[in-house]
Amino acid sequence: SDAMAVLAQAHYAGLLDEGTDTQRRRTEGARMVDAVTKAGGKGPEAEKARALRSIAERRANEAIDRLQSVIKQQPRDVNARLYLGWAFAALHDYAAASAAFEEALKLQPARIAALYGLGQAQLELGKTGEARESFLAVIKHSRDKHKVDHVGAMVGIAQLTAEDRFGDREARYLEILE
């Protein structure tokens, strides 16, 4: 039951973090969560799998309750904190998402998914300097670990660059008007 719950988490994590093979991952994740439930799975791994399904099915509040319960039982569970960040982000509560990602990073500093989630939350909060640092860390760790660039972080950097250019242009216009 735990092994199937972990596999279900992998499908949903790929869907939520990478956005890849969306329908296949959603279908496989749901099938596995159903199997875990049918087998009577009740532990933290099963709860995390159910929480991820809730996020994918736009029931993030339900996911938050499940994940906070897991964190009470297992305070050092990095995945539960990462998933909690995703749940808060799904509700557009970027301050809470940022805090959850930071907690995950305290436990596992080079966790690429948590760094990326933190960068996205910081970007939404208008913390462009911090977002840039987070996205650059994602790119560095992705290159070191996987030997590839993290496309999402590259897009984040591009967004920040575009915002910087707009801000520079706006500043020049204000200088002209003064």
Image (cartoon, rainbow, N blue to C red):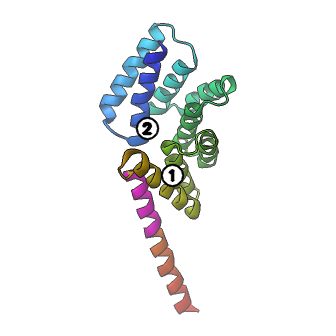
First in residue order: circle 1 vs circle 2 = 2
Q: What's the CA distance linking mark 1 and mark 2?
A: 13 Å
Q: Nearer the viewer, residue 135 or 22?
A: 135
- Quadrant housing the C terminus: bottom right
Label 1, on which residue?
120
- Residue at position x 55%, y 86% in the image: 174
Type of secondary structure dominating the magenta stretch: helix
| 1 and 2 marks in contact (CB < 8 Å) | no
Percent x, y of residue 133 = 54, 59
Secondary structure found at label 1? helix
**Residue 150, above or below 85:** below
Rendered residue at 44%/54% (across/down)? 139
160 in magenta: yes
Above or below, comparing residue 178 to residue 112 in the picture: below
Q: Is residue 170 above or below residue 24?
A: below
| Stretch in magenta | 151-162
Q: Is residue 154 left or right of residue 116?
A: left
Name the secondary structure under disc 2: helix
Residue 90 placement (x, y as % from top left) = 51, 41
User: Which residue is pictured at 51% across the width and 86% down the height?
Assistant: 172
Residue 43: name its quadrant: top right
- Give percent across and percent down for residue 94: 59, 48
Q: Residues within 10 Å of mark 2 (few under 14, many from 20)?
A: many
Query: Which residue position holds label 2?
Result: 16
Please, what is the three-letter code of the amino acid marked with disc 2?
Answer: Leu
Occupied quadrant, residue 81: top right
The question of residue 117 being in magenta is answered with no
Q: Residue at x 64, y 42 (%)?
A: 106
